[in-house]
Amino acid sequence: MAKSTSKPGSRKNVGRYVAPEVRGKVTAGAGGEDHSPRWYGALIVALLALGTLLIVLNYLRYCPLVSSWYLVTGLFIMFSGFFLATRYK
């Protein structure tokens, strides 16, 4: 077997993990609130439930007028709940 010709102390740090913060690839956070308020989770659940309820009531014909706008409104309310859920910390 052939021996390595390089000196033992001359090894480079190839393949060594360096955290992104150390390399400067990540910007520092604002340092403010890092969690959502207590009412935020309840708002998400309420919007999802209200949108679902509106759509179900429309299909069961409990809404005063037969219109597709109940479906659009229910989907918009549910979309708002999902959008808020992506911001939940």
Image: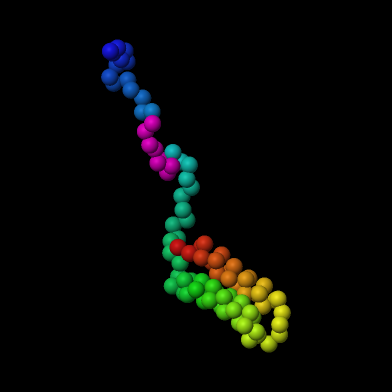
Q: Quadrant of residue 36?
A: bottom left
Q: Residue at x 48, y 71 (%)?
A: 40
Which colour assignment does the render follow? rainbow
State the count of labels: 0
Q: Is residue 79 visible?
A: yes
User: Which residue is at the front of the view, 71 or 34?
Assistant: 71
User: Which residue is at the front of the view, 60 or 47?
Assistant: 60
User: Which residue is at the front of the view, 34 or 72?
Assistant: 72
In the rendered image, the quadrant that contains the N terminus is top left
3 relative position to 18: left or right: left
Principal secondary structure, stretch drawn in magenta: loop
In the rendered image, the vertical position of residue 26 relative to residue 76, given as above or below:
above
In the rendered image, the vertical position of residue 76 relative to residue 2, given as above or below:
below
Instruction: State yes or no: residue 51 in magenta.
Output: no
Q: Quadrant of residue 75?
A: bottom right
In the rendered image, the quadrant that contains the C terminus is bottom left
Q: Residue furthest front?
A: 60
In the rendered image, the vertical position of residue 80 relative to residue 30, given as above or below:
below
Q: Residue at x 46, y 50 (%)?
A: 28
Q: Residue at x 40, y 41 (%)?
A: 19
Report the magenta residues as a range: 15-22
In the rendered image, the vertical position of residue 47 relative to residue 65, given as above or below:
above
**In the rendering, at what x and y percent does residue 63 appear?**
65, 85
**In the rendering, at what x and y percent does residue 17 appear?**
38, 37
Q: Residue at x 71, y 79 (%)?
A: 67
**In the rendering, at what x and y percent does residue 10 appear?**
32, 20
86 relative position to 9: left or right: right
Q: Is residue 33 visible?
A: no
**In the rendering, at what x and y percent does residue 87 appear?**
51, 62
